[in-house]
Image (cartoon, coloured by chain):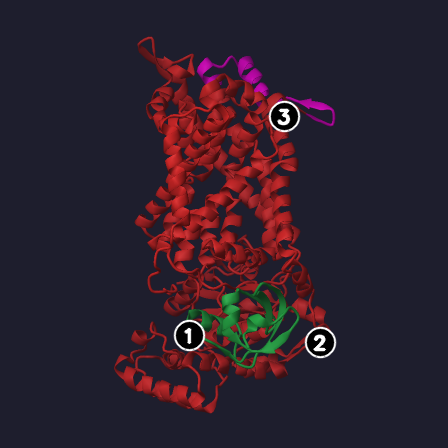
């Protein structure tokens, strides 16, 4: 059995940085509370059988959000061999609150005061020996970022784990509280080992319902309740608040002697920045400007330049490097295949299937990398938490919490981590609503679809690409209003309480690493799942029954795929793209959204789509007008996400029923919005009127009535506790 | 008076948090206990960024109203 050391501490105190340094792994580190939502384990460097467990950050052992539940249950049920408690040295008072609770668990423990470099820079003094004595547990100082003192901290925790030295909590509360705790301890069952008796006594005093059955004190419930009531009356407060106050009182008196602060400066740098960034007048304009820069630069200017180079150059006609002409991959591969005298089907598979399909996706990698770079920077600098605060006031009007904005923003990179980031939302209903609406925002994989439609069909018209994000936000906001009015989600969003981390300049290594990590997962998918899909699409489209026998067909229209696609294309006829190619593309998008572009690459011949797509798309004339293309774009942006994201929704909802509700809602919503765009657009541009126009009008009426009807009555308010 | 009436730059001391629910407990564990000094870093129509025990905490107006100073 390997020894297990758990890393526990407040959110954003540097647990994951320490974890990475001690295990040599590369978990993502951000600067906002709630980056780690799942526990992760790794092997301690240089030790064969010691496992390190990185837990989500918690403020106390009375959990408030879902990821706090994960951490608390782990500490209580699995009982690691030792706890390495990481404490943010720049914020000792609040961080030591959790420490006083952890000490009572009776598990060997070491407190590592992190960010010692910052303390020293400020000229603050920390008496580690004094703190160790006052809390009955060793205190060491570390800098997780610079790797200072971390090996010593781990060694100390390991030694205590091996020798099983549990801390002896010496912090004590008000005499009246201590008397009550002694009386409760006497009522505890004999099976509770001595080091844990204080923990159970305190929890019973706080009336923690989940602890009662474990404490072996069920029969004593009544006498314990009498003790607690008496103490509450004597101290004129409720039991939980009494304990919290006492803990803070202990900490304040302990650090008065153990921590000398050189507080010449009253306002910190972060406070000064916050005065501007969360200012009542400037907050929104600054936010809008940041968002505009991020998406405008990554989608249009620099991003478009990089994508043009990749698409037209590397996967197109060739490009120049210092005057040297480098041929594009398709041309090079084509001439190589011709020189080798490869069979027709083989060159078709390689050129029309793999290079066209996979190339179509890979061409967008530079653009995605730029977006990921910005996202990593936003996450690392500390602005993310401010965005949640600034947007809360607005999102609340639509029934969502400002915290829903973080999953949405992460979701512009990839929906899967976006959906997982919803765990920081305390309220069950708010969380479910966020999970359902997060994938409405275009993710990195939908970026190629947007770029393709905007570039090829609208000739790079400036508003098309940003409008995709606008459609996403509008879908989220209106869904918020609509869903909130149903019985499933009735009730106000939970109050907004969030810690704002200090601003820090993210390290270049961290930003680049996170950018590369996310980009690489797209490249990997292009080489695996997209590759397989493209080969399949190529096969199904190039083979079929012609002249009465099965074989390779000259016309795509004779292929198996055309036959299959035509059968189901009627589904999308009302939306204007009832063409089999678009239909097939939409369905392959469920596997991965890049596939939509990959499929077009195979079916239309990629280079032509990217360069002068208008010509080919134009050939489809009435079947695929710009209006239909826009309807196609909107449908693909809003409908059910890819399988990976559906899987994430399933995990977060933890119920098949809710997964179906989410997918059904998304797809139904996408269908109706697309229908309205195409049919009403057609009515206004050409005056065409038909059954589907009526249907679209009905959809508008339905939409408006859902939007403006009175809200359903809220069931009894229940904050989630698990 | 409720904390929500403070302006940017002003300070106060926590006297009480009204109500009794998970959010109150959460606020207390974040350091909003009786006698703790709190200052307002910025304020947007009642939603505020506060400084308490060396940490910045953002609260919406409903929450700020429940903290009596």
> In front here: B17 or A31?
B17
Question: Does the magenta run of residues contain A699?
Answer: no
> In front here: A49 or A174?
A174
Disc 2 from disc 3: Cα separation: 59 Å
| Quarter of image, res A385 | bottom right
Disc 3 from disc 1: Cα separation: 64 Å
Residue A87 % position (x, y): 56, 70
Closer to the observer: label 3 or label 1? 1
A479 relative to A89 in the view: left or right: left
Residue beneath disc 2: A262
Res. A204 mark: none
Closer to the observer: label 2 or label 1? 1
Residue at left offset 52%, top offset 73%: A110
Q: Residues within 10 Å of mark 3 (few under 14, many from 20)?
A: many
Along the polypeptide, which appears first: circle 2 or circle 3? 2
Res. B20 mark: 1
Q: Residue furthest left?
A: A219
Residue beneath disc 3: A313
Magenta-highlighted stretch: main secondary structure?
Answer: helix
Which span of residues is magenta-colored?
A: A320-349
In the figure, the shade used to draw chain A is red
């Amino acid at each position: 059995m390997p020894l297990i050391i758990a890393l526990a501490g407040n959110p954003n105190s540097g647990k994951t940085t320490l974890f990475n340094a001690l295990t040599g792994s590369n978990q993502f580190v951000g600067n906002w509370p709630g980056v780690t939502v799942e526990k992760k384990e790794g092997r301690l460097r240089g030790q064969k059988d010691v496992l390190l467990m990185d837990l989500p950050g918690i403020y106390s052992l009375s959990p408030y959000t879902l990821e706090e539940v994960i951490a608390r249950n782990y500490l209580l049920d699995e009982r690691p061999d030792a706890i390495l408690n990481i404490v943010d040295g720049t914020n000792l008072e609040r961080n030591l609150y959790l420490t006083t609770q952890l000490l009572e668990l009776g598990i060997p423990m070491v407190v590592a005061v992190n960010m010692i470099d910052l303390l020293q820079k400020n000229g603050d003094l920390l008496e580690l020996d004094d703190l160790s004595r006052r809390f009955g547990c060793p205190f060491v100082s570390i800098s997780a970022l610079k790797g200072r003192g971390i090996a010593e901290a781990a060694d100390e925790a390991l030694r205590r784990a091996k020798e099983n030295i549990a801390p002896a909590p010496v912090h004590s509360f008000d005499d009246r509280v201590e008397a009550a705790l002694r009386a409760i301890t006497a009522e505890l069952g004999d099976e509770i080992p001595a080091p844990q008796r204080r923990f159970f006594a305190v929890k019973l005093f706080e009336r923690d319902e989940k602890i009662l059955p474990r404490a072996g004190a069920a029969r004593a419930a009544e006498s314990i309740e009498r003790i607690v009531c008496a103490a509450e009356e004597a101290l004129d407060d409720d039991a939980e608040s009494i304990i919290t106050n006492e803990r803070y009182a202990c900490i304040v008196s302990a650090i008065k002697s153990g921590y000398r602060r050189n507080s010449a400066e009253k306002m910190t740098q972060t406070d000064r920045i916050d005065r501007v960034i969360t200012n009542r007048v400037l907050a929104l304009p600054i936010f809008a400007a940041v968002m505009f820069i991020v998406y405008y630069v990554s989608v249009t200017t620099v991003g478009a330049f990089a994508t043009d180079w990749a698409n037209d150059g590397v996967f197109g006609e060739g490009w120049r490097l210092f005057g040297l002409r480098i041929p594009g991959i398709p041309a090079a591969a084509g001439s190589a295949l011709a020189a080798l005298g490869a069979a027709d089907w083989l060159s078709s598979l390689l050129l029309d299937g793999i290079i066209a399909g996979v190339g179509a996706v890979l061409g967008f990698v530079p653009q995605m990398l730029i977006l990921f770079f910005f996202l990593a920077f936003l996450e690392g600098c500390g602005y993310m938490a401010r965005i949640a605060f600034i947007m809360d006031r607005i999102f609340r009007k639509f029934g969502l919490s400002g915290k829903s904005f973080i999953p949405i923003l992460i979701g512009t990179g990839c929906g899967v981590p976006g959906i997982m980031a919803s765990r920081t939302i305390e309220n069950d209903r708010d969380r479910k609503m966020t999970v359902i609406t997060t994938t409405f925002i275009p993710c990195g994989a939908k970026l190629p679809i947007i770029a393709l439609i905007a570039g090829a069909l609208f000739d790079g018209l400036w508003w098309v690409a940003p409008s995709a994000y606008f459609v996403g936000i509008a879908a989220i906001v209106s869904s918020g209003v609509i869903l909130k009015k149903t019985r499933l989600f009735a009730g106000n969003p939970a109050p907004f309480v969030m810690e704002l981390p200090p601003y820090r300049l993210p390290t270049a290594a961290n930003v680049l690493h996170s950018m590369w990590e996310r980009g690489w997962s797209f490249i990997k998918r292009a080489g695996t799942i997209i590759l397989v899909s493209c080969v399949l699409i190529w096969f199904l489209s190039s083979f079929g029954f012609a002249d009465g026998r099965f074989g390779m067909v000259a016309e795509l229209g004779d292929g198996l795929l055309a036959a299959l696609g035509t059968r189901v294309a009627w589904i999308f006829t009302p939306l204007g793209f009832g063409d089999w190619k678009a239909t097939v593309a939409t369905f392959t998008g469920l596997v991965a959204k890049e596939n939509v572009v990959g499929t077009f690459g195979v079916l239309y011949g990629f280079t032509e789509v990217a360069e002068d797509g208008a010509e080919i798309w134009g050939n489809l004339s009435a079947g695929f007008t710009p209006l239909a293309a826009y309807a196609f774009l909107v449908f693909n942006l809003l409908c059910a996400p890819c399988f990976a994201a559906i899987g994430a929704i399933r995990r977060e909802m933890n119920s098949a029923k809710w997964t179906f509700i989410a997918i059904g809602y998304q797809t139904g919503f996408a269908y109706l919005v697309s229908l309205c765009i195409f049919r009403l657009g057609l009515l206004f541009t050409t005056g065409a009127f038909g059954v589907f126009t009526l249907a679209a009008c009905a959809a508008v009426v339905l939409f408006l009535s859902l939007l403006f009807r009175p809200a359903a009555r809220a069931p009894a308010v229940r904050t989630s506790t698990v | 008076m409720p904390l929500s009436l403070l302006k940017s730059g002003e300070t106060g001391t926590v006297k009480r948090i009204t109500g009794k629910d998970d959010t109150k407990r959460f606020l207390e564990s974040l350091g909003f206990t009786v006698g703790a000094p709190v200052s307002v870093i910025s304020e947007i129509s009642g939603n505020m960024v506060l400084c308490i025990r060396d940490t910045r905490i953002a609260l919406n107006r409903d929450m700020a109203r429940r903290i009596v100073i």
